[in-house]
Image (cartoon, helix red, strand yellow):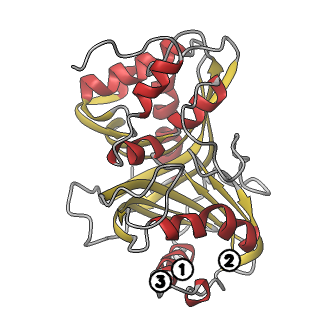
Amino acid sequence: MRPDDADFRLQAMQRLNDLARGQTDVIAHDATADASQPFGQSDAAGYATLMSDLRHALPDLERRDDIFLAGANRDDARWTASRPAQMVAATGAYVGTFRAPFAGIPPTNGVVTLTYGEAHHIEGGRIRQSWLVWDIAGLMMQAGCWPMAAPLGHAGLWPGPKGGQGLRMLPTDDTDSLDRVLAMHDALHRFDGRDLNSMPMEAWAKDFMYYAAGNIGASRGLSGFRAHHQIPFLRAFPDRVGAGHFVRLSDGPFAVTGGDVALTHTGADYMGIAATGRKLRMRVMDFYRLDDDGKIAENWLPNDTIGLMNQMGVDVMSRMRHLTGNPDTSLR
């Protein structure tokens, strides 16, 4: 079966749900995972441990996909690491009762959501390679232990796509959505360093919703997007440029890209951190829904906030441990 087969999609969803329910045998023996900080890269055993730790923390863990896409992974010459030709990608939330610590985050004994963007290579009924962009910063915020400045946008659980249809079981060979998204990316790269209008925004619907994870937050429409995300981001990282996508999929009115943005923190402070002068990589995934006019109406942005801050020289996890009663007691 191939990702352009409806049965494959159902099987892929089932395998990911099996994994969330604790069936780590769906992970291939030679699988790899690349997860948000503080986890990083792992082999099959490490991947299984990560999922077991999550289930231990949330014993009634449930996986809820809002968007699930599958198909041919369009080429991107900028990405030189391993990159499967066929992939599935999903965004949604792990939901459960937070009973035990996870990544050092203290439990709340109440319901929490761990929102995610994920891309997977599934072959022969086994997960062979995964990229896991989990909103660990958002989980900290729910637990009341986020140790950094508050996001400028609205923090909270992202809604699924307007009108539903994010879980598409009838595949399509339509690639128009991805073409439009990549054209929009090219337009953003036209920024002249001074004028926001140097980046054409015709690809976006008038009142588009922008749901950014981590320490960015949600906003609505062009004015909200610029005020809460684009202007602070461009002031901090005037040289930002896409460094390649590990996933590029399109399916009807939905598309996804996922990869790294290369940045130099030479401008203003960002997320409360003064300019460091450091060269950074920001891991992001973008899920898009286009409306009937072909405009981007919704954009979900899972991102690795903690990994970005770590590259800036700020150990968010250490600060959290300190604030929750477990400070470092030595220099080592």
Quadrant of residue 209 within the rendered picture: bottom right
Quadrant of the frame with the C terminus = top left
The correct choice, above or below, for 59 with respect to 251 in the image is above
Q: Three-letter amino acid code at disc 2? A: Trp
| Element on which disc 3 rests | loop
CB atoms at circles 1 and 3 under 8 Å apart? Answer: no
Mark earlier in primary sequence (1, 3): 1
Dot 3 corresponds to which residue?
A: 193
Residue ID for mark 1: 184
Q: Secondary structure at mark 2?
A: strand
Q: Amino acid at mark 1?
A: Met
Q: CA distance from mark 1 to mark 3?
A: 17 Å
Q: In the image, residue 167 lies at what x, y percent?
A: 64, 50
How dense is the environment of label 1, judged by Cα within 10 Å: few (below 14), some, or many (20 and up)? some
Q: How many marks?
A: 3
Q: CA distance from mark 2 to mark 1?
A: 9 Å
Disc 1 vs disc 3: which is toward the camera?
A: 3
* Near-viewer residue (124 or 321): 321
- Residue 200 pos. (x, y %): 60, 87
- Residue pointed to by mark 2: 204
Q: Are marks 2 and 3 in contact (CB under 8 Å)?
A: no
Circles 2 and 1, Cβ within 8 Å, touching? The answer is yes
